[in-house]
Amino acid sequence: MATATAELAINGGTPVFESNVPFMAVGLTEKDIAAATEVLHSGMLRAASKCAALETKFAEMTDAKIGMTCANGTCALQLAYGATIERGDEVIVPAWTYIATASMLVAAGAKVVFCDSLEDTYQADPADIEAKITPNTKAIAVTHIYGIPVDIDAIQAIADKHGLRVIYDCAQAHLAEYKGKGIGAFGDVCTYSFYATKNLGTGEGGIVTANNDEIARKMGLLRSHGETDKYVHEAIGFNYRMNDITGAIGLSKLDELPAQTNRRRAVAKLYHDRIDAIDGIHRPVPTEGSEPAWHLYSCRFDEARFNCTRDEFTAALNKEGVPTALHYPKSLTEQPAFADVVKANGGHEPPVALKLAKQVFSIPMHQNLTDEQVHGVCDAIEKVASAFCK
Ligand SMILES: Cc1ncc(COP(=O)(O)O)c(C=O)c1O
């Protein structure tokens, strides 16, 4: 029997949760703090042994050859693009990603061409990537958005066929796997963010990984003023370095990341099973052969099935004690910052990205959720869906 709308917390009914379920897990453990304190006591504040150890360990754990820490995930993208893309190169990037994946291409002087995404996995659509290739295309820059790997085999096949570079924005995908390998095994460069809310969060921070020595060498030059020896500058570069306090926190957190990622996967499985049974709400579908890192768990709201808007639906969920967020409220083609890019793309706006912006909502996803909380979140979605269903 349908839930009466009067039973919803938003209408004065009893909420599913007395207090809000935490949306994400952030913060440091005593072990992380001790690791940072040790560096503070040592006085070695610049990038040194802690950053070097983080680079080795992170590369190893993601099946990449070389790791290089940097200041944040945006700098990671700048290093990756700086080492693989020339000014004027055409680069295909999804309209359904965080702004930095595309904006740093503009900053690198590339001509951005937006491709669409698949509505079930949310990942860049290989068929649309291929359709957008011209003789000027030099690279594909795609995001494993929400921590779900893209269809890497399909994208690599396109890249091989057309001689293109592939850059993966892995800011949301630490320890994600594809066909039994870490995602660092694929593409020319993988870039990561260690922003406070990421699966591995050091506050600010990032890393790039590569499997090619020459690309890694170029990124190394860009990271630190093109310096090859003390005050010898082979190329123009920047200061995008990390520091050892951040490096120590990252190393400490990396110890816990495999277990935390496994817990995220178990939470995702519980969500999948429950949400599959809720009419009108679609859950994220992993790309075939992938093991996502589940940075976010974003569902789709089918507006045709409900008597309310997506925003009314999430407002009702929030009152039940389930916080939600929109990742993202707009396709990049709707952002004023890309008005000129859209114009240069002939006004084309990938339609699935536009649709996703109207449909998605993220629910709590992190390693500290208990089974009881996960079931409570699903109970709340079920309750609100039942009250608003047509
Ligand atoms: C997909 C994606 N790319 C890039 C970034 C940028 O990382 P940062 O905030 O560390 O600069 C983020 C962070 O929000 C992200 O989610």
Image (cartoon, rainbow, N blue to C red):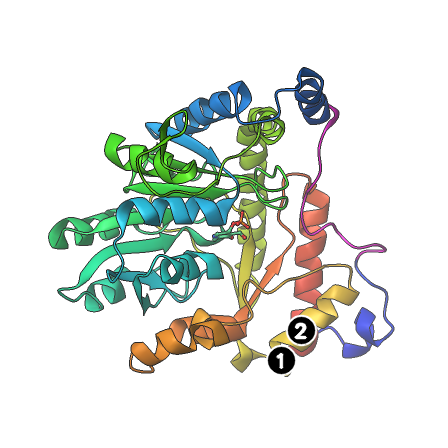
Q: Is mark 1 within 8 Å of ligand 1?
A: no
The residue that appears at 38% across and 77% down in the rendered structure is: 340
Q: Which residue is mark 1?
A: 309
Magenta residues, start to end:
17-30
Residue 156, percent across and down? 22, 48
> Three-letter amino acid code at disc 2?
Phe
The residue that appears at 19% across and 52% down in the rendered structure is: 164
Residue 268 shows up from this direction = yes
- Magenta region, main secondary structure: loop
Residue 42, percent across and down? 67, 16
> On screen, 135 above or below 251?
below
The residue that appears at 24% across and 33% down in the rendered structure is: 214
Is 277 in the magenta? no
Disc ID at residue 204: none
Residue 125 shows up from this direction = no
Residue 353, percent across and down? 42, 71
User: Of residues 69 and 258, which is closer to you in this image?
Assistant: 69
Q: Quadrant of residue 201?
A: top right
> Three-letter amino acid code at disc 1?
Thr
> On screen, 300 above or below 339?
above
Disc 2 element = helix
The residue that appears at 27% across and 37% down in the rendered structure is: 215
Q: Residues within 10 Å of mark 2 (few under 14, many from 20)?
A: many
- For the C terminus, which image quadrant? bottom right
Do the CB atoms of the residues marked 1 and 2 lie less than 8 Å apart?
yes
Q: Which residue is mark 2?
A: 313
